[in-house]
Image (cartoon, helix red, strand yellow):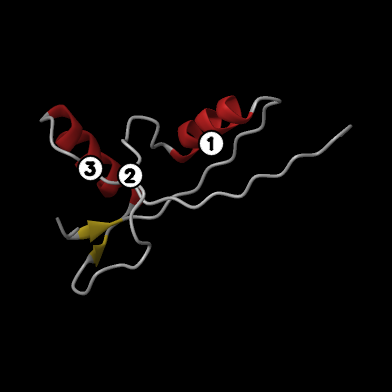
Amino acid sequence: MVPKKVFFTKGVGKHKHELQSFELALRDAGIEKCNLVNVSSIVPPHCKIVSRQKGIFSALSLWLSSLLKVTVFSDIQISSFGI
């Protein structure tokens, strides 16, 4: 399966538990309903960059029709003791 469209988003989540902060970051980015699948971060040739709104709408439309949508993500985790 080769993606034909891609969109970019970002999110931040802060919580004392790592899993909860990850969930909050997904919600902040607006992709909490997407299935996360680790794939290459290289955008294939002829892949169209669409707006975040169009990308999320397309992803949710596919989700409702039970088709797979793929989310490529990168994350930065920072643990701050006593802050």
The residue that mark 1 highlights is 25
Image coordinates for residue 43, horizontal then vertical, percent? 30, 67
Proximity of marks 1 and 3: CB atoms separated by less than 8 Å: no
| Depth order, front residue of 76/7 | 76
Q: Going 33% across and 44% down the picture, which residue do you hit? A: 37
The first of marks 1 and 3 along the sequence is 1
Tag in front: 2 or 1: 2
Mark 1 residue crowding within 10 angstroms, few (<14) / some (14–19) / many (20+): many
Q: Quadrant of residue 47?
A: bottom left
The residue that mark 2 highlights is 37
Query: What kind of element bears circle 1?
Result: helix
The first of marks 2 and 3 along the sequence is 2
Q: Residue reaching furthest right? A: 82
Query: What amino acid does circle 1 point to?
Result: Ala
Query: What kind of element bears circle 2?
Result: loop
Q: Going 15% across and 28% down the picture, which residue do you hit? A: 64
Mark 3 residue crowding within 10 angstroms, few (<14) / some (14–19) / many (20+): some
Query: What amino acid does circle 3 point to?
Result: Lys
| Whole-number angstrom distance, CA of label 2 to CA of label 3 | 9 Å
Tag in front: 2 or 3: 2
Q: Going 35% across and 61% down the picture, which residue do you hit? A: 40
| Whole-number angstrom distance, CA of label 1 to CA of label 3 | 19 Å
Query: What amino acid does circle 2 point to?
Result: Val
The residue that mark 3 highlights is 69
Q: In the rendered view of the protein, which quadrant contains the N terminus?
A: bottom left
Image coordinates for residue 38, horizontal then vertical, percent? 36, 49
Image coordinates for residue 75, horizontal then vertical, percent? 55, 49
The first of marks 2 and 1 along the sequence is 1
Q: In the rendered view of the protein, which quadrant contains the C terminus?
A: top right
- Compared across the picture, whether 23 is left or right of 57 comes to right
Query: What kind of element bears circle 3?
Result: loop
- Compared across the picture, whether 38 is left or right of 75 comes to left
